[in-house]
Structures are given as structure tokens and as C-alpha cells.
Amino acid sequence: MRFRSVNPYNGQLIKEYEGHSDEDVKEIIRQAGNAFNRWKEVPFEERSALMYKAASELRSSKEHYARIITLEMGKPLNESYAEIEKCAKVCDYYAEKAAVFLKDEPLDPPHGEAYVHYNPLGVVLAVMPWNFPFWQVFRFAAPALMAGNTGLLKHASNVPGCALAIEEVFRKAGFPESVFTSLLISSGQVKQVIDDPGVAAVTLTGSELAGKSVAATAGNNLKKSVLELGGSDPFIVLKDADVRTAATIGAKARMINTGQSCIAAKRFILEKEIAEQFTDIFIEEIERMKFGNPEDKSTVYATLARQDLAEEIFEQVKRSIDMGAEVIYGQLPGKIESAAFPPMVLGNLKPGMPAHDEEIFGPVASFFIVENAGEAVAVANNSTFGLGGSLWTTDIKKARELAAHIESGAVYINQMMFSDPAVPFGGIKNSGYGRELSHLGIREFTNQKTVWING
Ligand code: NAP
């Protein structure tokens, strides 16, 4: 199979790449296994030194890597710079903390001495999406490699340039051969990789459909899997909130990455007393954001990463409107002729409508008006997803109580949802299972081994 890197802003072909054959894949897995046998014995200090070098490489060649992202998936350049910086941060974080997080952990057994010892699992496959094409990979690779695993990356088919550039970061940092390798393969070849006895575990960040398929193959092989899937995060604003700040941040939380973020705020749940004020400020904010060429540093949002993604959103919005959704802001285009999709706000949403039930992976906000905080939580929980959430109120005691009742992997109070190396990240329900980042993330791909000494 050949992989095409296409600039979504102008539709121009950047480059074509020849994919790996099934035979190539077998050999790459074998080499990653050999590399694992050596890498797992490398002391933490040496692994850290290399990971710090990866961070330096990212920072010193930020312009180079950021441009690859922007040209290949259409993210505004300023967001690409921030993404590269964040990757460097996660490398530094695990370079510093891995040895602490994986230190033997004393237990309190009924007799003798016992502890948990952490061993790496082996070759880990990462199946990754295009939306944060560097960050998603580094947030897996930095902890997984620091724990002593070796990594294989199957990146999304539209970002082969990013896949190879990430391999270049680790090579330039001086990592040994085959500790991190990008496989240029189709989604159809993923099963072969998971089935291979040389692969120990798999992590997937992507859609529910892909997650189910990968988890089924992993389950069939009794191999560990971690899934980071879609979300339809609630953004709850109570009547006692700082409405201006909430609406300003809310607009940013919906529009970040042109709406293509798993943890973008997607369902805005507003207490009726502040709904009108919130809506007015939210729309003003969106109108202030500049659409344009992602290479232009003043651009705030751009086209989506592919035309078919815009077509999918068109269908979701059209079906919602046909079923009675109200267009509060924006206008549905007559038809989709490029990768662009305009910002829209929809209201009067009912179960069964795509804008109520599904994840909309683009600049479309779903608005819900509720009578009180209890109803807000009920609406938030009325979703098959459970990734993140944001709650706005000046009553922090009440916020803590409500946060405990929200069904999601995270609730952020008086701030938008975002990820940070120090804070666990992951979902429940159809948003997946397992955690990335923090001390929890690095332990996912380890054998948490009990050692108990009698005496
Ligand atoms: P996707 O279609 O599921 O693709 C993600 C990755 O899975 C790609 O590498 C894709 O390869 C591969 N893939 C697709 N179907 C597969 C299958 N049946 N078996 C094995 N691999 C398969 O998702 P996407 O549209 O690129 O990304 C958007 C989705 O990712 C959204 O739902 C978003 O919310 C989610 N996401 C979640 C997180 C999180 O942390 N929870 C973060 C970012 C994005 P091909 O490209 O070759 O098809």
C-alpha cells in the first residue's frame, strides 16, 4: 500500500510513501524484540539522558517538526509549535520521574517482606490518530520507552510524514536502533501485528470502531490493551459562575484544533438564568476567531484534516436539523467541496439526534439549557462517552460534590479540559479504559510483579 501526504488546506500532494509489506512487518517486530532484550537492561540514567536529548531535538528543530504537522493535517502553525513544546515537556517529565515512579513499592504483608517490582512488558504497538499527530505518540512513547519497552507506531494513514519525523526525533537523540519504529501499514495490517507472538501489548487512540477491533484482537491473544477513544465532553455552567470567563474559555475549548480534539468541550450545559448571556459571549468569541491558511500565524482555526471528515460532520448536522435541532449560530453549507466546515451552534437537541448522541469532531457546539445543577449532571451523564468534563461555578464545595457524580475520566473545575504530563488522562464508558500520563500511565505497560520474601 502507498501512503499519501496531502495538504488539507489546498489539496496539494506533499509526498507519497511506500508502505511496509507483511514480510517487512514481521522482520521489524523481530528487530524490536531483539532491541527490547538489550534496552530493558539499560539503566534509568542512560535512558533518561536519551529522553532529555529527544526533548532538546524537538525544541531545537521546532520549526521543522511544526511545519510537518501543519502541512500534513492542517493545524494552525501556532498550535503546532505548542504541540512540539508539549512533546518536549513530556520527554523531560518522564526522563526525570520514571525511576521514581517505577521504584520498588513496599507492601504490608502479614509476614516477612513484600514489594511490587515493575518490569517492562516488551514490544508495544501504538495505533495513533492524526489530530495531535506528535503529542498522541509522545505521550505513549516517553513513558513506555522509559519503562524499558520498545515501541512500534502505526500512525493514521494521512500523516505518514509525521510518523517518520517522530522516528527521526528518536534517531537523532541517539536511541538504539529499533527501540522506536514507525510501521507504514494500513489498519487492515494491525491484526497481524497484534497476533504476532513478538508483540506484548497494544494501545490505541482513536474512534470507538477502531478501539473495538483492536481490543477484540488483543483479547483474542490475551494481550494487554489500553484504549483512548472519542468523547463528547460536557461543559457545565451554573448560574453562579463567572459567565464571561466561562464563555470565553468555552469558545476556545470548542474551537481548539478546529474542533478536532477528543477532549474539546462538545456539549454546553447551561443553567437557564445565564444561558442567554453565555450564548451571546460565546458567539462573539467565535466570530473574533480568524479562519485561514494554517501557515499564517494569525490564523486561529483552519480546514479540517481531510474533506471526508467535513462530509461526515455535514451529515451529522444535517440529520440533527432534519430531526428538529435549532441552528443558534452559523449556517449549514449547501454542500462540502473542501475540507472546510464552518463553526455552528445547535440547540433544542433530543436523544436520537447525532448532535445529541454522537461525537462531532469539528467546530460544532451542542447547547442544552437546564433548570438546575442536578439536571445539568443528569444531562452530562446521558452520554455513551465518559472522557472529560468541565464545570463552572464559584461554589467550590458544590463543585466537588457534583464532580463526584459526573461519569467521566476527569472533571476540571473553572478551567477547560486539557492534558498535562503530571495528571492522569483517560476515559470510562465508550471513551475507553486505562490511563496515560502521570505515574499511572508509565505503569500501564509494566508487569506489576509481587515479590514476597518469607523471613
Ligand atoms: P480512527 O479512524 O479510529 O483512527 C485512529 C487510528 O486507528 C488510525 O491509525 C487508524 O488507521 C487506525 N484504525 C482505524 N480503524 C482500525 C481498525 N479497524 N483496526 C485497527 N486500526 C484501525 O480515528 P480518527 O478519526 O483518526 O481519530 C479521531 C478519533 O480519535 C475521535 O473519535 C477522537 O475523539 C479520538 N481521539 C481520542 C483521544 C483520547 O485520548 N481519548 C485522543 C485523540 C483522538 P488508518 O488511518 O489507517 O485508518
Image (cartoon, rainbow, N blue to C red):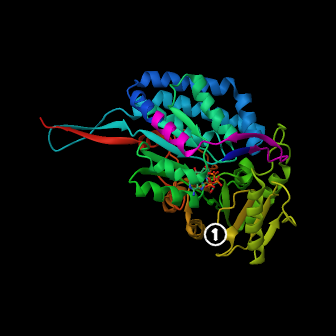
User: Foreground residue, 194 or 98?
Assistant: 194
Q: Is residue 8 left or right of residue 111?
A: right
Residue 85 in sight = yes
User: Foreground residue, 253 or 122?
Assistant: 122
**Residue corresponding to mark 1:** 357
- Residue 397 percent location from the top left of the image: 52, 55
Mark 1 is surrounded, within 10 Å at the Cα level, by few (under 14), some (14 to 19) or many (20 or more) other residues, namely: some
Q: Secondary structure at mark 1?
A: helix
Residue 93 covered by magenta stretch: no
Residue type at mark 1: give it: Asp
Where is residue 135, by image quadrant? top right
Residue depicted at x 41% and y 38%: 122
Residue 30 covered by magenta stretch: yes
Residue depicted at x 51% and y 53%: 191
User: Foreground residue, 356 or 445?
Assistant: 445
Magenta-highlighted residues: 5-31
Q: Residue furthest left?
A: 455
Where is residue 84, by image quadrant? top right
- Residue 79 percent location from the top left of the image: 73, 40
- Residue 145 percent location from the top left of the image: 48, 33
Q: Is residue 216 left or right of residue 156?
A: left
User: Foreground residue, 22 or 148?
Assistant: 22
